[in-house]
Image (cartoon, coloured by chain):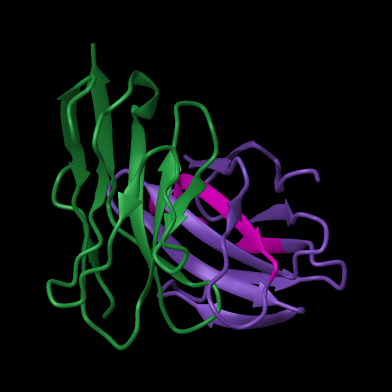
Amino acid sequence: AQRVTQPEKLLSVFKGAPVELKCNYSYSGSPELFWYVQYSRQRLQLLLRHISRESIKGFTADLNKGETSFHLKKPFAQEEDSAMYYCARSTGGGNKLTFGTGTQLKVEL
Amino acid sequence: KAGVTQTPRYLIKTRGQQVTLSCSPISGHRSVSWYQQTPGQGLQFLFEYFSETQRNKGNFPGRFSGRQFSNSRSEMNVSTLELGDSALYLCASSPGGQGAYEQYFGPGTRLTVT
């Protein structure tokens, strides 16, 4: 079965500190990986996807096939980054997403 | 463009009853996926419909079913409700086609089974 693992339920950092949200996936073929974010009282929305290789809101994520990881990073955390972050992979073609359990990021002043 | 809409937003049902939830995708989107979100199991994929056909299916019992209409609107039905079906049900739409597209999520329907 396809698995996505986010080992941290909660990650608390100070404003201005670097952030790394971990994500590991079970290996199978060529994965398509995503990070989705849910801000308080807002809908789940796409943050970034690995094939676009872009930086969104200062966040980047690199696919490491050797380590089967897709960690989300930001050099300097901002208060507005506080949210729930989900790593997900597309499986079986189409739009079937397998989500990790999510990491709650809390940025403290 | 208007976002994904889901109706109703909240629902309370009794064990054994059935329920139908509705999802209207973003205009032009042909794929609609459904997810169940619970504190214990997180976000779990139910099924995806594309051009009125079920394209992907998750590991849920047959009590969970869905359909898609010619205008891409989708409904999901849960029959013989159980307490464990209490959850937030999310619908997501995307343009469709092959490959994985960005999915746009609705606000969800909060179902409580008593």
Pick whichever, A27 or A19, lies toward us: A19
The residues colored magenta run B75-95
Residue B84, x across and y down, in percent: 38, 52
Residue nearer the viewer, A106 or B50: A106
Q: Name which residue lies at 80% across and 67% down.
A: B72
The answer to whether residue B81 is seen in the rendering is: yes
Compared with residue B8, is residue B48 higher up or lower down, i.e. above or below?
below
In the rendered image, residue B20, in percent from the top left (x then y), is placed at: 68, 56
Image-quadrant location for residue A2: bottom left
What residue is at 29 percent from the left and 57 percent from the top? A100
Residue A32 placement: quadrant:
bottom left
Q: Is residue B4 left or right of residue B64?
A: right
> Does residue B79 appear anywhere in the picture?
no
Q: Residue furthest bottom?
A: A29
Q: Residue at x 44, y 55 (%)?
A: A54
| Chain ID, purple in image | B
Q: Position of residue B55 (x, y in %)?
A: 60, 83
Q: What color does chain A have in the rendering?
A: green
**Vertically, is A95 above or below A45?**
below
